Image: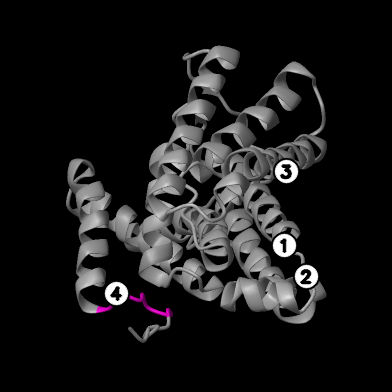
Amino acid sequence: MGFLTNLINGISLGSVYAIIALGYTMVYGIAKMLNFAHGDVIMVGGYICFVCMNNLGLPVAVSVLLSIVGCTCLGMVVERAAYKPLREAPSLAVLITAIGVSYFLQNSALLIWGADPKVFKSVVDLPSLKFFDGQLVVGPINIVTALTCVLIMVCLTLFTSRTKMGKAMRACSEDKGAAQLMGINVNTTISMVFAIGSGLAAIAGVLLCSTYPTLMPTTGSLPGIKAFTAAVIGGIGSIPGAALGGVLLGIIEIFAKAYIGTQLADAIVFGVLIVMLLIRPAGLLGKEIHEKV
C-alpha cells in the first residue's frame, strides 16, 4: 500500500502546486510578467487565516474567506503600486521589482508576526477514509485539496471562456493595444487578474499549511518556486497545463522522497524542469509561438 499512499500524497501536494501555478500562469498569460512575489502572498494568506482562527477565534469558513479577501486586496494594491508604473518598462525592471516586493512581504511578515514558527491548525475537521481493512488511510485534507484544485480549474476555464471579463482577459493576452482600441480597459483587466491570482494564493496557503502545519515568513518561498516550475512544465499561460504540471510535479517530488531520498528530491524536481525545457520548451500543453523578425 506504500505506492498508493505515496500516489495520494503526491496528488494532494501537486494540487496545492497546481492552485499556486494557476495564479502564475494567469498573470503571465495576460500581463506577460512573472510575479515572483506570488509565493509570499501564499504566506500572507496563511498568516491571516492563522490570526483569524487562533487570535480572534473566528470560525474556519470566515477565517478562510477573510484570508481570500485580504490577499485579493493585497494583490490589487501590489499591482497598482509596484507593477502598473512599469507597464511599458523593460522586463528586467519588472523582474527586479517583483523580487523587491517579495523581500518586502517576507520582512514585513517577520516584523509583524516574528520569526518563530506557528503551529497551524487544519481547516478540515473530518474523519479519514480507510480502505483495505485500514491498510490505506486517506486524510480528509488530501481529498479536499484535490477537489478544490479540480473545482478551481473548472471555474477558471469557464470564467475565461464564458464571461465578459474572461474574454477581455483573453483579448489582452493576445494584443493589449488592439484590446484597448476595442474599448477594453486594460489596466482594470490586469488588476482583476492579480486579484484572482492572489485569491488563489490565499486558498493554496491555507491548504498548504493544513497539510504541513508549520507557518513562518518563508513558508511560501520554495512552494512558490516549485509551482512556477509546474507552470513551466505544464505550459505557462495554459490553465489546464498549470494544473497538469502541478499534479505531476507533486507526484514526482513525493516518489523521489520515498524511493530516492529527501535530500535529492528538490534536485530531481528542478532536473525535470531542465529536461522539459530541452525537450519541449513550450511545456506539455503550451503552444509554440513563432515570431517574425
Mark 2 vs mark 3, CA separation in Å = 20 Å
Mark 4 lies on residue: 281
Q: Which residue is mark 1?
A: 189
The amino acid marked with disc number 3 is Ile
Of helix, strand and loop, which one carries label 1?
helix
Classed neighbour count for the residue bearing mark 1: other residues with Cα under 10 Å, few (<14), some (14–19), many (≥20):
many
Neighbourhood count class around disc 3 (C-alpha, 10 Å): few under 14, some 14–19, many 20 upward: many
Give the image location of residue 126, x and y in percent: 69, 45
287 lies above or below 100: below
Q: Check residue 165 in the rendering and tell me which mark sits there, or answer none.
A: 2
Q: CA distance from mark 1 to mark 2?
A: 7 Å
Q: Is residue 20 left or right of residue 202?
A: left
284 falls in the magenta region: yes
- Closer to the observer: label 4 or label 3? 4
Q: Is residue 244 left or right of residue 205?
A: left
The amino acid on which the numbered mark 2 sits, given as a three-letter code, is Met
Query: In this orientation, which residue lies closer to the viewer: 268 or 85?
Result: 85
